[in-house]
């Protein structure tokens, strides 16, 4: 998971840098749920961002991840679904 988050933060920082280099006067991040968590992680290490809006971030990501890992270890099957608006989410159920 750490590599996945590091890659996401690197890509957000890369895009932010490109926008600023192209002449954007400022870059703000807006994220919902996991996107909010990633926006917060990015903002902690990138002073170039003008602002960050975190909508419903998971404040205890470690707890959420450990729960998902326990379900997978118990033989749970994960499936990708799309909720309203086409936003993906993954649901894991222990068998």
Image (cartoon, helix red, strand yellow):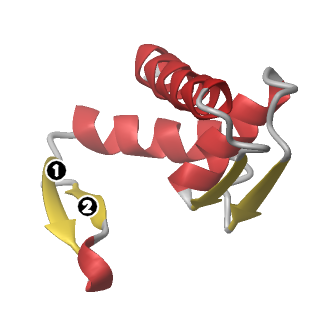
C-alpha separation, residue under disc 2 versus residue under disc 1: 6 Å
Farthest residue, direction top: 3
Describe residue 19's horizontal placement relative to residue 87 as left or right.
right
Farthest residue, direction front: 23
Name the image quarter holding the C terminus: bottom left
Residue 48, labelled with which disc?
A: none
- Circle 2 packing at 10 Å, graded few (<14), some (14-19), many (20+), is few
Disc 1, SS: strand
Q: Height in image: 75 above or below 11?
A: below
Classify residue 47 by image quadrant.
Answer: top right
Report the residue at 41% width, 23% height from top: 4
Report the residue at 60% width, 40% height from top: 38
| Horizontal and vertical percent position of residue 84 | 29, 85
Between 28 and 41, the residue placed more toward the observer is: 28
Q: Height in image: 49 above or below 48?
A: below
Residue that carries the numbered disc 1 in the rendered image: 78
Q: Height in image: 84 above or below 55?
A: below
Disc 2, SS: strand
Name the image quarter holding the N terminus: top left
Between 58 and 49, the residue placed more toward the observer is: 49
- Circle 1 packing at 10 Å, graded few (<14), some (14-19), many (20+), is some
Between 6 and 16, the residue placed more toward the observer is: 16
Dot 2 and dot 1 residues touching (CB under 8 Å): yes
Farthest residue, direction bottom: 84
Report the residue at 73% width, 59% height from top: 54
Residue that carries the numbered disc 2 in the rendered image: 91
Report the residue at 50% width, 26% height from top: 5
């Amino acid at each position: 998971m750490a590599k996945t988050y590091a890659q996401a933060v690197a890509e957000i920082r890369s895009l932010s840098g490109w926008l600023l280099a192209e002449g954007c006067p400022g870059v703000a991040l807006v994220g919902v749920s996991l996107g909010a968590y990633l926006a917060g992680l990015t903002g902690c290490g990138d002073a170039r961002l003008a602002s960050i809006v975190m909508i419903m971030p998971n404040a205890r990501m470690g707890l959420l991840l450990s729960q998902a890992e326990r379900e997978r270890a118990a033989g749970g099957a994960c499936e990708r679904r799309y909720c309203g608006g086409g936003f993906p989410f993954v649901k894991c159920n222990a068998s």
